[in-house]
Amino acid sequence: MDEQGCPRCKTTKYRNPSLKLMVNVCGHSLCESCVELLFVKGSGACPDCGTALRRSNFRLQIFEDALVEKEIDIRKRVLRDFNKKEEDFSSLKDYNDYLEMIETIVFNLSNQIEVDATKKMIDQYKKENKNHIRKNQSKMSRDEELLDALIEQEQQESTMRRMMTLEDEKREKAAKRKHKEALIDALMYQDRSAYDIINSHKEASQHEEVEAKRAAVTAFSTGIRIGHQNDIVPLAKLEQGQLYRYCPLIMEWMGPEPPTMDELYTDGYLKNIRSASDAERAGGFREALACHRALQDAMCGLFSYPPKAPSPGKLMTAGSSSSHSPMMIF
Amino acid sequence: MFSTSSQSKYWLFNGETELTFHRTEANEAYIRTRRGNRTDDEAKAYFLTPSEEKILSRQYEVVLCKFCSEFTPPMPRCVIGTSLAFFKRFYVHNSNMDYHPKDIMLTCVYLACKVEEFYVPIGQFVRNLRGDREKFADAILSFELTLMSKLNYHLTVHNPFRPLEGFLIDIKTRFKEISNLERIRRPAEEFIERSLQTDACLVFSPSQIALTSLMFGAAKEGVSLDRYLKDVLLKTATTREMEITMYQIRRVKFTVKGYEPVPREQAQAVQKKLDLCRNQENNPDSDVYKQRMLEKLDEEEDMRVKKRARLNDDK
């Protein structure tokens, strides 16, 4: 996506981070200062398309694509008139057709397709459904009602919570004061040592604090109650197999045992090979690796002797003469 | 590691006798399917005999080596070793008449390049050939999968080159009596290269070949490695293991020394015979082959059409 910017003064979001783009009904964006400059009188023409615009109709551009803004604008206007609800239709299909029609109108208007015909259609619809529109304007749809109810409920809850915390704080303060008084009383009238008394009081108050804390938080912000993990269905316990036991790799050399990696260093094998270059070392290569491999390869299979079992090759002869056919896999 | 490899498990044979047995079997199997109503004598005259097949294989091994040594970019020795091993393994269970060694040879080299991580794109590969390069490329690619399946996908080959390095390092470290050991390297390497022309890689382990090459090189330079063998390398080995090793070394020496290049005229005569009796289905130049390829293409096209139709139906 290109840098967002004002098409008139060419300021971009990069050069002026506080740039605010505004958009009007025609869908062409302008920055805030340009709007102020061009629409001093309160109305004027869009510098892009020449549509007559009013300054009061400018609003902040939320979406990067100005066309989307335009579409939202048009949709808002269209929906003001086309405000039938699902209850107004006899069948779901009719309602869907109606929604489809709205979409077509919005699309046509925002993409400049058959504007006149569409406008005419809207006017006609308006005329035909005058009463209906007015009636529905005052009525809220079920969705909106539900939303309102939700918001109301949330507000109630938040006030409740605030009240609770306030009360808690009050109670805590009172308790603290009481403690202090009790402590002073004890210091004044009891004949235990002052040190003991202070210590025991401290313990008691700490204990209480912990208790309070435990009581206070009973639910996460998501509404899941703390300490109620038992509600979660426990996972089926996996059948535990036998524990892994490490057994060292036993190499079958078929030859004398080659030196180990450590012996390469101690016995001076490495003196007899080219040492790795710095570049190779950087990649994690050490000359010992190559040396080790060569020695292993040298020792391995030295005692190999014609296989005792009948050669497995015999198994393959059956498929060997047929052309292009995959060989038997055994 | 060689001891657990497919090479040791599936591609080591008892010796020349067993190899001949398998090759004869492959030869007979081919003749059985193709002879029609020829009499024994006619068949013998028409088809290749096992010994003729061997001449042909040997001849093409030489060609393969020559091709590899002239290859640009120059290829590492292990590629040559691996491609020869592929070639030999392939003709243990297949007849020269079934698949022409000319095609298989190139495919072996191409596959070995890939296996030994010396990848050369096919376009660059065929630039090393004279003649219709596109045709060569087609043939190589079409035989590649067949070759792999016939090799049973046992593609890792252990060559004697690395063991040779290992022995050299070991001798330098543990047997310091020999001065200027590097002079052995040349004759030893020559020995290994010679061994590639024989069936040694189908009978012996790479370390045995390498050790023999070293002994050979040492003998040529007038050095004795017997004390190294006895006191250092096989110090911990049992008597039986020692005997096996010495026996195998003798056998390797015998096998490699017994190698004789095939006379050119003889090979050419066999090749002429082969042109008649080869399996035309596997000849990229033949009409039968082309016909079959076309059929295969049609089949694929059919499959695609069917698939598309099914997709459309689903919609």
Image (spheres, coloured by chain):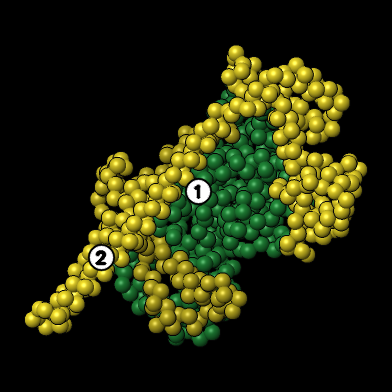
Chain colours: A yellow, B green
Residue type at mark 2 is Ala
Nearest to the observer: residue A100 or residue B156 = A100
Above or below, B214 relative to A223: below
Residue under numbered circle 2: A175
Q: Amino acid at mark 1?
A: His
Q: How many marks?
A: 2
**Position of A247 compared to B232: left or right?**
left
Residue occupying image coordinates x 51% and y 86%: B179
Instruction: Tell me if residue A82 can be seen.
Output: yes
Q: Residue at x 52, y 55 (%)?
A: B157
Instruction: Pick out the residue farthest to the left.
Output: A191
**Parent chain of label 1:** B
**Mark 2 residue element:** helix
The Cα–Cα distance between marks 2 and 1, rounded to whole angstroms, is 84 Å
Q: Name the foreground residue: A258 vs B276.
A: A258
Residue occupied by mark 1? B154
Q: Are marks 2 and 1 on the same chain?
A: no
What's the residue at 35%, 72% (across, down)? B234
Q: Is residue A276 positioned above or below B138 on the image?
A: below
Give coordinates of residue A125: x percent, y percent: 76, 20
Q: Which mark is residue A249?
A: none
> Where, quadrant-wise, is the C terminus of chain B in this rendering?
top right
